[in-house]
Structures are given as C-alpha cells and as structure tokens.
Amino acid sequence: MTHAFKPQSSRILLASLALAGLLTACGEKPQQREIPPAPVTVIKVTSGSAPLSYEVLGETAGYRDVEVRSRVSGILQKRTYVEGQNVAAGQVLFEIDPEPYKAALDQAKGNLAIEVAKLEKARADRDRIIPLFKENAVSRKDYDDAMASYAAAVASNSAAEAKVREAELNLGYTKVVAPISGMTSTVAQSEGSLISPSGESGRLTTISQLDPLYVTFSYSEEDRQRLEQMAKSKQVNLNDQRNIKTTLRLADGSAYEHSGKLDFSDNRVDSKTGTIRARAIFSNPQGKLLPGQFVRLHLDFGTYQNAILIPERAIVQSQADKLVMTVDKDNKVNPRPVKVQPSTTAGMVRVESGLNVGDTVIVEGLIKAKPGSVVKPVAASSASAVAKS
C-alpha cells in the first residue's frame, strides 16, 4: 500500500535540519585572542669604578685597660672616687693605712742621722791623718784604717739614704693614684680589707681609656688572598694600607659619626680559626662607645675597576643559586646564574660573574617574565612614561 508524501511532513523535516545545523555551529570553538607580550622594565649592563669595601663584625675595646693595684700591704681605709666615673691621671683613688709606713720612715731617718754622724767622724779622722802620714808621724796601718773607716762610713750613709727614700716611697704608695685617665670599673676590694701587693687582693679596680677606642675584628685568610690576587691582576686599585679608612654602624643600625682607620693587622693566621686578627682605632670624645659593644665595621680598601653594578631587586633566588632574567635580541627571557657581592652603593650589588657589558637585565616585572616567554622591554628611564600612557 502506497502512502503519499504530505507537505506538512516536509516542513517539519526542513526545520529539524536547520536546527541541527544551528546546534553544530554553536558547538565550534571560538578563535583565541593572542596575548600581547608583558611589559617589563630593563636596564643595559654597564661597567665602571665601584668602592672596594668589606663589612665585618667587630667588638669595641678600651685603648688602654690598666689594672689599679696596691704596691704596699695594709688595711684599705678609704675609696675617694665614684665607681663607673671618669678619673684623671694622678687622681687619688684609694687610701691605705699610712701609720706603719710613717713609723718606718721615722726609723729610716733616725738611722740616717746616725750614719751621717759616723761619716762626719770618719771624714774628720781622715783629714787629720793625711798630713801626719805625709810627715811619717803615723804608721801606714793607721793611715789605711782611717781611709777604710771613711769609705765604710760613706757606704753606710748611702745605704741609710736609700732606706729613707724607700720608706718615703712606701708611704706615698699608701695613696693609690690613677695611672691613666679613663673610666673606672667596679671596686674589687672594699674598705677594711687587708691588701697585699701579690695575688688578687692587690687588684683594686680597672681603668679603661675610652678616647680613642679600639675595634677588634678578624678576617679570613681567603679574603686576604683574594684581595692580593685582584690587586696583582689590576682589577682593583688599593688605598694606602697605612691609612685605610673605616666607618661604624651600631647595633641599632645608626651610623657612628666619627670615622677611623685601620691600626693593626697581625702577621700570622690563627691555626684554629683560619682567620687573621686586626684592629681599627676611632675617636670617642663623648664616650658614646663603650668596651664590649658589637658593631658593624666597614673597611674602605680602594676601588674596583670595570665593576658591574645592578639593582639588588633584579636578583632572583633559586634554591642555592642566584639568577637574573635577561632579554635577548628576540625579546625572549633567558635566566642567567650570577655570582654577586654586596656593594656600598645603596640598593645595588656587584656582579662578579655571569653578566657581560651590554646585556639587558629585567629589574621590574619579574613575575611576568617566565623563562622562554616573549616580553616587551621598556628602558628604566622611560618606564614612568609608559606607565602614564
């Protein structure tokens, strides 16, 4: 049985085909827009002179630290200064009981008076016997005895005079004076203590001279060898080693207002630490620095020749390595491992290896600068203008 094709069925079929075509068209993926290169700020690597300096940890020490000790025995009667205050050289600090030494001086003076009388008698006997001996009025023995007695009297008189001077010195030592000007430490012995010149009982206090002041530090044997090698290869120009300037930075980060100079460097290496001891000297007129402080010491050794300086913010830390992102002629990002050292120029580091003059280094926009990606480099000088556009 044959069925005729109805027009209504034809319209339904055409509508179904059109709907299928529309759905197929909607399922196609749209074309992706190409992402433009990310703008980054770059600099061209150049070379020039740069300060050659080192920063080390140092400890302050008194210019002179002198122990004040008793030179005689006795009872400590009095302290005449305030602990922790400045004292002047020759100022009386302590008084020891002087009475035994006054008695010893009186006795020495009495013995001297006896010896003076003996000397006068011996001189008179000598003066009388000399003319008599010339006239053969006395024997040779009498003459020799008189001369020997006079010589013995002279010697005894000298010894008695020495005893008097010794007694006077001992009496003077009962007043213990400051050997130098400086700041005193705590008292080691209190009033009423029995003092003796030997042993710890004789140590009364310590005086530290704080102006000028030393800063002691150590540097490695490798640093010294590297400095010598750079000087031989003409990579650096060294300052006069007898006048190397130094500056200080205190524990709070502030700079000390007075500069100093290198005062001493040892001629031997400590076998235990592999370091060399050295010392700088600084003026300390207001006593701002005290012995025992830890400070950061900057040493100005000279200048680098043809040094490469780049901003510290251009350095990318990758595990144990330091990298910089460079841009080649095709504006493609290439990471470059570098070896850097701190620089005294604020915010800059000195590149020892890994970069050459003329390289292009990214300093801003590092987050967008993926290795191998293409970027739009903008010179640092015109970066602000690009930002405004």
Image (cartoon, rainbow, N blue to C red):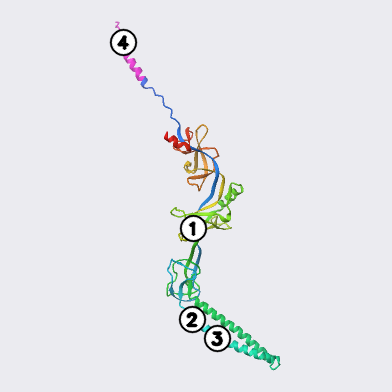
- Asked where in the image residue 79 lies, by quadrant, the reply is bottom left
Res 113 label = 3
> Is residue 322 visible to the viewer in this orientation of the structure?
yes
Mark 3: secondary structure: helix
Mark closer to the chain start, 4 or 3 = 4
Mark closer to the chain start, 2 or 4 = 4
Give the amino acid at mark 4: Ser
Q: Is 182 placed above or below 170 here?
A: above
From the viewer's side, name the closer residue of 140 and 1.
Answer: 140
Residue 255 point in image, percent of width and height: 46, 53
Q: Is 37 placed above or below 20 here?
A: below
Nearer the observer: mark 4 or 3; the answer is: 3
Residue picked out by circle 1? 59
Q: Classify the position of the C terminus by image quarter.
A: top left
> Is residue 369 visible to the viewer in this orientation of the structure?
no
Mark closer to the chain start, 1 or 2 = 1
Nearer the observer: mark 1 or 2; the answer is: 2
Residue picked out by circle 4? 10
User: Local crowd at mark 1 within 10 Å, few (<14), some, or many (≥20)?
Assistant: some
Mark closer to the chain start, 4 or 1 = 4
Nearer the observer: mark 2 or 4; the answer is: 2
Mark closer to the chain start, 3 or 1 = 1
Residue 87 point in image, percent of width and height: 46, 68
Seen at 34% across and 15% down, the residue is 18
Res 14 label = none
Q: Magenta region: which residues?
A: 1-24
The reply, left or right, for residue 143 in relation to residue 183 is: right
Mark 1: secondary structure: strand
User: Local crowd at mark 2 within 10 Å, few (<14), some, or many (≥20)?
Assistant: some
User: How far, Cα to Cα, is label 3 from label 2?
Assistant: 17 Å
Magenta stretch: helix, strand or loop mostly? helix
Residue picked out by circle 2? 102
